[in-house]
Amino acid sequence: MSRMYDSMEPKVIDDDMLKLAVMEQGPQEEAGQLAKQEGILFKDVLSLQLDFQNILRIDNLWQFENLQKLQLNNNIIERIEGLENLTHLIWLDLSFNNIETIEGLDTLVNLEDLSLFNNRISRIDSLDTLVKLQVLSLGNNQISNLMNLVYLRKFKCLRTLSLSGNPITEAEEYKMFIHAYLPDLVYLDFRCIDEQVKELAKIKHQFSIDELKHRENVMELRAEEEKAKKDMLEEHKLAFIEYLNGSFLFDSMYADDTEGNKLSYLPGVNELLEVYKDKFVIICLNIFEYGLKQQEKRKIELDTFNECMLEAIHENQEQGKFKIAKFEEKHMLNLSAIREETDLPTIEKKIVECSEDINELFNVLMTLEMQLVEQLEETINIFERNIIDLVGTFIENVQGLMAQCRDLENHHHEKLLEISINTLEKILKGELDEDLPDSVRALFVDKDTIVNAVGASHDIHLLKIDNREDELVTGINTWCTHLVDKIHRDEITRNRKRVKEINQYTDHMQSELDNLEFGDIID
């Protein structure tokens, strides 16, 4: 069920092993020789074979970011790890190792074929994110719980399953159970599933399957609701007004307000709180609705900006392509004329003319690029002014609404203080008819004590309001700064890339021209 350690020393994947594997598995012809001279970038490798290497630990694969196929079979690997960056992986073979637990596969969301054949696995789990999984090989392991197979129902694309060699396959109901609970399977243990047998299994387990489907539907509905809530919260966060569409901020003010909660027992305070809460929540809802509208305005502004940028770049690229096409048409004719020419002075003259054409093309393309840079810079500056104005207006209006929240809190504080002092006077005179909890009566020792209690409650409320305002203002200012900085960085990167492309193209054309040998030209 597992591989024994070979006599050779256990290995960890290192750069030397990876370079050797890439070179050995690369093309053998001219392309392979060129690759050996210039080197192969790991990020360009699509398939990697590391079987029979006595590998104990998976490591150093992070550079293979575009890898699609990975063979790690027939090693002595004990843990699935170090694969988190291989997000493009489609095919993974970890068969014939010493793996006990399925783990470390969460980021491999594109995986379609997974082999864990001949390991020490006793439980099928931790595959939730592999939604594209089509082939799963778990033969020759230690899986013994038949109900554990129900876990595989969530993989809607799974068509091929191998479990032969596990204790589970010795159960009398093994195949009928799988046919009933995994009806979309086409192949089980290397055999095509008979549709009639599948139908009999369905009938036999009908009641249990119906119950399971009901539970799955309930769970799926809950998951959809949770996802909808999460998605909506993310939208609200993008607008910086999360949790302002209700009483959350108001409730949070009293969550840690011990004194305020005690004072709510005073006569007339409950009614005062209800009025306060209603007005406070209305202001929060105003901030929320305003925030959504402003977010839509910012989105429209950003979308319009991106469209303008792409349109300008596309138009400039088309002009560049046209210039290059005209140049190449003329250049090919000139090269043909040079090859047919037998007079050396004429050849040299034509080569000089070709070189001048290349320089002219370089100047034309660079002029186009400089024009584009100026055009995009102006577009970026206009967008920057607009988005900063939108953010500034949003902050100014939100601060005005938050000031209204503070006004309500100040008004409530004055009324609460008035009620508290009146209550103190009644207690001192023995005229208070209402029964108050001992913890509340303990506040009414003297005027200073009750004033301090009311003041402490007021300070907590103001702090909550201030913190929420600061969170909103800081959040949107940070977003705006990062957005504008990223736009400038992206434009610098685009410009450098384009200039590099122009240089590489014209250098290549000049190099081809320089490498024309007169001996090849003259008969």
Image: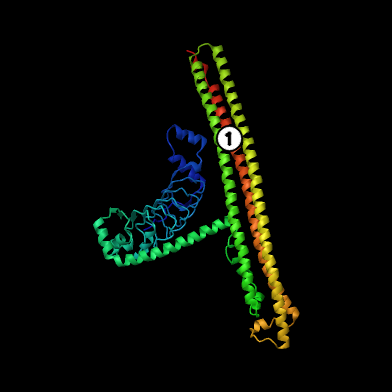
**100 shown above or below 256:** above
Q: Is residue 156 above or below residue 439?
A: above
Q: Secondary structure at mark 1?
A: helix
For the question of whether residue 131 can be seen, the reply is: yes
Q: Position of residue 16 (x, y in %)?
A: 50, 44
User: How are the residues colored?
Assistant: rainbow
Residue at 50 percent of width and 13 percent of height:
341
Q: Amino acid at mark 1?
A: Arg
Q: x%, y% of residue 293?
A: 59, 54
- Dot 1 surroundings within 10 Å: few (below 14), some, or many (20 or more)? some
Q: Residue at x 61, y 40 (%)?
A: 491
Q: Residue furthest left?
A: 196
- Looking at the picture, tell me which residue is in the foreground, 17 or 461: 461
Residue beneath label 1, please?
498
Horizontal side of residue 321 vs 125, given as left or right: right
Q: 10 or 60: nearer the eye?
A: 60
295 relative to 156 in the view: left or right = right
Is residue 145 among what the camera can see? no
Specify whether 481 is left or right of 127. Answer: right
Residue shown at 64%/70% (left/top)?
276
